[in-house]
Amino acid sequence: VEASIPEPQREAWKKFSAQEFSSKEEFEKEVVRHIETTLARSLFNCDEAAAYAGTALAFRDRLVIEWNKTQQNQTFADPKRVYYLSLEFLMGRALDNAMLNVGMKDIAQEGVSELGFRMEDIISQERDAALGNGGLGRLAACFLDSLATLNYPAWGYALRYRYGIFKQEIIDGYQVEIPDYWLDFNPWEFPRHDVTVDIQFYGNVRKYMDDSGKQWSVWENGEIVNAVAYDAPIPGYGTKTTNNLRLWSSKASHGEFDFTKFNSGEYEASVADQQRAETISAVLYPNDSLERGKELRLKQQYFWCAASLSDIVRRFKKSKKPWSEFPNQVAIQLNDTHPTLAIPELQRILIDGEGLDWEEAWSIVQKTFGYTNHTVLPEALEKWSVPLIQHLLPRHLQIIYEINARFLQWVEKKFPKDRDMLASVSIIEETQPKMVRMAYLAVIGSHKVNGVAELHSDLIKTTIFKDFVKIYGPDKFTNVTNGITPRRWLHQANPRLSELIANKLGGYDFLTDLTLLHKLENFLDDKDFRKEFQEIKYANKVRLAKYIKEAQGISVNPASLFDIQVKRMHEYKRQQLNVFGVIHRYLQLKDMSPEERKKVQPRVSIFGGKAAPGYWMAKTVIHLINQVSAVVNADKDIGDLLKVVFLEDYNVSKAEIIVPASDISEHISTAGTEASGTSNMKFVLNGGLVIGTCDGANIEITREVGEDNIFLFGNLAEDVEDLRHAHFYGGFELDSQLQRVFDEIRNGRFGDAGQFSALVNSIVEHGDYYLVSDDFQSYVETQNKIDEAYKNQEEWLTKTITCVARMGFFSSDRCIEEYAQEIWNTEPLPPPKENGA
Ligand code: 9GP
């Protein structure tokens, strides 16, 4: 290890090396020290923000000590490491997670109370680290938690966006986007100004021959941007392993600004380069499941892939092992196609930088990468135009062409004279302009490709990657059903339920082996347990009701049935189906006599989610929900029988309040469109039931909890194509109930009808691509069944407890074990036993 302290001086280091606080007093001392010295504040001007900062810094120090030890241990043991490349990590807040994972929350709670604060207030001071859009980014965050908890030597790599996902405000019922500048105070990151990488863009490729006659390609004359590493510690639960999340920030390569230009009066030009460079990591693209092919996005992708690979290769080279060992030391997982450029980049490093021949290099590349596909939606499959790649990354384009040529030659041998096959699997799409199909490049450059739920993994084999299955055989394709970390999504979000379960099961082992939950079924008849379980759900609903009142000014009765749909706004997720159902319910209530109304199950319909700023239809659905909310909530006739709430700015920390409070949550995508979904798992784990289509992970949830404990409705994936076809050619008869909903929208009952005509017309005139009309009746009937079922509270309770007991399969720990065994071929590296331990 370079730059290390000579042996004789190490004793002093050991003697004075930083110690973790281990008691309440030591913790308080650390908090006060940070507030007084790091923040230069005192007891006379310590507000909640300062108390948060002091607490966070105290815990950060604690994490850092274990983090250093973990990294040292990994450096010495030099095991195979996993690198998770994801453009998104939706981490949420770190403090609560850190306190729980190191098992010190109780002590800290007492400590801050002695210092004059309440822990909830301190926790709520923290801004979410919102470096992601939705499910894909949150999955990556759950995976980091599981990797550390299971002691896998693993790194996450992403970008350090200055602005995460925008903050959503609702103004007059419309979504307005506000920049999310989250870095004002971020105690969890460490700038590593000594860990930098020069990243090249543009330029040209020159070929030359060396003395031995070998041909080389040099990529030169490009523009250089500097990547600077920022590291964040990722603590495991119940282990000392603390892994690293490395985020790259972009900076001009030649320092702050150009003095020559400044001196000659060109003030703006003097900082222009700097700004251009910094733009690369400035903002997270706010699109979920849509790719727009913008140059800056491609720059982000290459910048991050190149910086990460340079880091990985540098670490490998320190081991002095031969290149053939690279895949035995390094597993790189591509989270969706966003990091696919890592494939040609590694090939480039190996052939142009290290002088390996093509075949040898390519075999290393293929053994190193695994690719996870997260969608079959055509609009989400990335394609980059050949001229754009040619301009930005000329050497990579050559390499991509070479990969393609060799691949097609090989395919040609297996399928002689099959021109259709060659055209269909070519990385290059022969359009005008030509396009590079990133998903194909990812499949060809990886040794395994996985989908994220059983149905989805089957679908990719019969649709988008059908021909690749013929070429490679089925074994290259596998399934790893998504999961969630029970630490955040049960223990942190629902501490009372976690404690109740621990009391019944004799400890918290279920948090690291979620299958132990099955033992809860033994308590189905235990009256005290049932009562407490029910009380906890009620208390969580009270907490959400309070939040709704504070945030949206709407009073809701916690005794109502809470029906929740929170996720990104997207036509395929069908919030429009939900809101049409709400309108239908409202119209029915209006038709009823007071006597009939008395029999109705009161309900609160809660929505939340962001729409991509350019996704007009999704924004229209938000607007409609808010209009319906305004009309229904103001209707004195209806009172508590129906309330409609759109919760502003749905994010991870809000999910922690929302998820434990559902009676029913909605996962109602058109069958075959939602790859997995993960909030479905979170809601069920917290004792809520699901209304859902036979889609994504709903299918496996049904398998686990049993058909009687979930409310499924709607058409099946296998029928979708025929139904679409029928709409296209035959038109259709609209269900009379849905017709009435549309009539009321069109006659202006929910505000200016013109605003919603495109939404309604997408169904009645433009083919109803998402099959809202086909599923409406079945949806409404199923909602009625839910009302009935909810009336029998004892049976409902039995269902919810049974569901919780059967959720063991959906831990992200199980996913990580599957990835480790099936794809990465890696082993855990537990922390060394400490003296006396
Ligand atoms: O839409 C999928 C969602 O169903 C899945 O749960 C999540 C994690 O696997 O990935 C989402 N996909 C994307 O965000 C874009 O591919």
Image: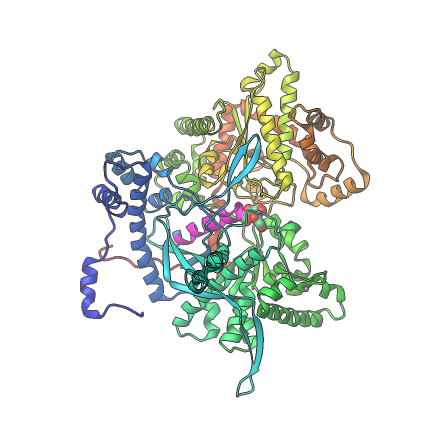
* Residue 568 inside the magenta-drawn segment: no
* Residue 143 inside the magenta-drawn segment: yes
Quarter of the image with the N terminus is bottom left
User: Which residue appears at 75% of the width and 40% of the height?
Assistant: 767
Quick check: can you spot residue 444?
no
User: Which residue appears at 48% of the width and 74% of the height?
Assistant: 324
Q: Position of residue 596 (x, y in %)?
A: 62, 14
User: Which residue appears at 21% of the width and 70% of the height?
Assistant: 7
Judge whether 747 appears above or below 54 on screen: above
* Magenta portion: prevailing SS class: helix
Quick check: can you spot residue 730?
yes
Q: Is residue 500 left or right of residue 161?
A: left
User: Which residue appears at 55% of the width and 78% of the height?
Assistant: 357
Magenta-highlighted residues: 132-148
Judge whether 446 appears above or below 549 on screen: below
Q: Using the image as rendered, state which of residue 60 and residue 39 is in the foreground.
A: 39
- The residue lying furthest to the front in this view is 264
Judge whether 334 appears above or below 514 on screen: below
